[in-house]
Image (cartoon, rainbow, N blue to C red):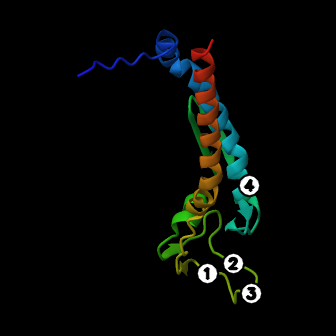
């Protein structure tokens, strides 16, 4: 039986490129992470999926990045209550002795709030953005592969 010999051309260059993989890939992936801000912003829309009453919730969204990490989040204190909802609870006056609103018959010392239905807008944003985010990272991987191939063929 004959021996079969397989020779890998440019093996040393391939090994060197693979050793440098992190150095090659990290800046490319970081660009994809940063580019995801535009995608998240695109899908964070008034009334779909972010509820709109005063506009503060929608305007409060921020994007923060770190090394290969990003966060897209609202900064208003009540965002969690909109997202998760609330159970029935009592509301008491904060700065006055009684509560009053236009249309009320008279001031009251407390109000029974029925609670608020959850509106998981962050999950809706993520679901809508996922296909576009995936495309960004597929493009980034293609660029990384081309860079590794360039280094092997040098």
For the residues labelled 3 and 1, the Cα–Cα distance comes to 13 Å
Mark positioned earlier in the residue sequence (1 or 4): 4
- Which secondary structure, mark 1? loop
- Which secondary structure, mark 2? loop
Mark positioned earlier in the residue sequence (4 or 2): 4
Q: Name the one closer to the observer, 78 or 135.
A: 135
For the residues labelled 4 and 2, the Cα–Cα distance comes to 39 Å
- The quadrant in which residue 3 appears is top left
| x and y percentages locating residue 4 in the rendered image | 32, 20
In the rendered image, the vertical position of residue 20 relative to residue 39, given as above or below: above
- Which secondary structure, mark 3? loop
Residue at 49% in and 15% down: 9
The residue beneath circle 2 is 100
Whether label 2 touches label 1, CB < 8 Å: yes
Whether label 3 touches label 1, CB < 8 Å: no
In the rendered image, the vertical position of residue 78 relative to residue 17, given as above or below: below
The residue beneath circle 1 is 108
Mark positioned earlier in the residue sequence (2 or 1): 2
| x and y percentages locating residue 32 in the rendered image | 65, 37
Q: Of tags 3 and 4, which is closer to the observer?
A: 4
């Amino acid at each position: 039986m004959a021996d079969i010999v397989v020779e890998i051309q440019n093996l040393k260059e391939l090994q060197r490129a693979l050793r440098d993989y992190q150095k090659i890939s990290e800046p490319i992936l970081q660009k994809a992470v940063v580019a995801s801000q535009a995608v998240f912003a695109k899908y964070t829309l008034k009334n779909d999926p972010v509820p709109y009453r005063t506009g503060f919730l929608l305007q409060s969204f921020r994007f923060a990045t770190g090394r290969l990490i990003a966060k897209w989040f609202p900064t208003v204190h009540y965002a969690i209550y909109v997202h998760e909802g609330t159970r029935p609870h009592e509301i008491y006056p904060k700065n006055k002795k009684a509560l009053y609103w236009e249309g009320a018959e008279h001031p009251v010392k407390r109000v029974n709030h029925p609670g608020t239905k959850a509106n998981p807008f962050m999950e809706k944003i993520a679901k809508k953005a996922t296909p576009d985010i995936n495309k960004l990272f597929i493009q980034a991987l293609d660029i990384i592969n081309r860079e590794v191939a360039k280094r092997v063929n040098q």
